[in-house]
Image (spheres, rainbow, N blue to C red):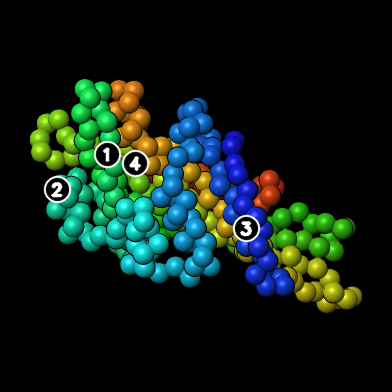
């Protein structure tokens, strides 16, 4: 598993915010490069981290944060205009739809435009809440509990269809973003308990989150249509907290 840890920032005396980006699907052995190239995904992570858990989707403001990357917030009507019937599979209210296009060189020497749609949904089938309890320490005088809220952010990647004037889906990938609220319980005096709380954020990317069409055009190999993760194992500083099954793992 390849991961990079971001610095820990103290936001209040008891609240800490941190983020870990993991590049391990845990299912199929894809090359390391399949997990590492996702600048738009990184920007979405930074945006959601900055919101400090106060997400409202659909969220038009996220477009401002991603404009410099060529990404725009679009409506269902706009997606239908751009993608035709292929757009119907994306719709899942309430969602924020982000649209961009990549120029992809083909093996014949020509280049084509490859649309990517990122879907951030607040619907129950894309958001999962779990609670975990950590081990007791110091003879049971201290223990931790974790409240975890996981969001799935999907990427739908397309290439022009060889059969008609529309587009074909190349791959569905995703990354997961988790807010983790850690409460440390302890005895402040005989018979009395107290608690402090820290907040962390965590993200894990499935393979080819933004690069599926580039891979297929360069190598001519077809990727699986569905690259989503089945579950995500949450960790803080290398310590595993628990595993959360995702939508693909619950189907």
Of the two numbered discs 1 and 2 in the rendering, the one whose residue sits closer to the viewer: 1
Residue for badge 2: 84
Q: Position of residue 60 (x, y in %)?
A: 33, 67
Vertical placement of 78 versus 189: above or below? above
| Residues at discs 1 and 4 in contact (Cβ within 8 Å) | no
Instruction: Identify the residue at image location x=48%, y=32%.
Output: 33
Which of the labelled discs sits on residue 103, or is there none? 1
Instruction: Looking at the image, tell me whether mark 3 or mark 4 is earlier in sequence order.
Output: 3
Q: Work out how far the residue at label 3 is from the one at label 4, CA to CA, in angstroms.
A: 28 Å
Instruction: Looking at the image, tell me whether mark 2 or mark 3 is earlier in sequence order.
Output: 3
Q: Is residue 197 left or right of residue 41?
A: right
Instruction: Looking at the image, tell me whether mark 2 or mark 4 is earlier in sequence order.
Output: 2
The local secondary structure at tag 1 comes to: strand
Of the two numbered discs 1 and 4 in the rendering, the one whose residue sits closer to the viewer: 1
Q: Is residue 171 left or right of residue 13?
A: left
**Label 3: few (<14), some (14–19) or many (≥20) C-alpha neighbours in 10 Å:** many
Question: Which residue reaches farthest left?
Answer: 164
Residue for badge 3: 18
């Amino acid at each position: 598993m390849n991961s990079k840890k971001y610095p820990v920032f103290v936001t209040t005396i008891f609240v800490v915010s941190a983020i870990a980006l993991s590049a391990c699907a845990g299912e199929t052995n894809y090359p390391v490069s399949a997990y590492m190239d996702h600048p738009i995904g990184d920007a979405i992570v930074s945006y959601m981290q900055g919101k400090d858990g106060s997400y409202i989707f659909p969220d038009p403001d996220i477009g401002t944060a991603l404009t410099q990357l060529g990404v725009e917030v679009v409506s269902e009507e706009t997606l239908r205009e751009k993608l035709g019937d292929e757009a119907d599979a994306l719709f899942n209210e309430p969602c924020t739809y982000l649209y961009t296009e990549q120029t992809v060189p083909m093996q014949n020497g020509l280049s084509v435009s490859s649309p990517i749609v990122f879907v951030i949904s607040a619907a129950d089938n894309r958001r999962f809440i779990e609670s975990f309890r950590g081990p007791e320490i110091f003879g049971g005088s201290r223990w931790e509990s974790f409240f975890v809220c996981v969001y799935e952010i999907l990427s739908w990647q397309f290439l022009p269809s060889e059969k008609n004037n529309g587009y074909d889906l190349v791959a569905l990938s995703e990354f997961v973003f988790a807010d983790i609220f850690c409460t440390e319980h302890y005895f402040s005096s005989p018979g009395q308990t107290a608690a402090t709380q820290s907040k962390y954020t965590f993200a894990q990317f499935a393979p080819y989150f933004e690069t599926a069409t580039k891979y297929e055009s360069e190598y001519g190999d077809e990727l699986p249509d569905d690259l989503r993760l089945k579950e995500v194992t949450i960790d803080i500083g290398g310590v595993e907290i628990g595993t959360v099954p995702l939508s693909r793992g619950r189907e």
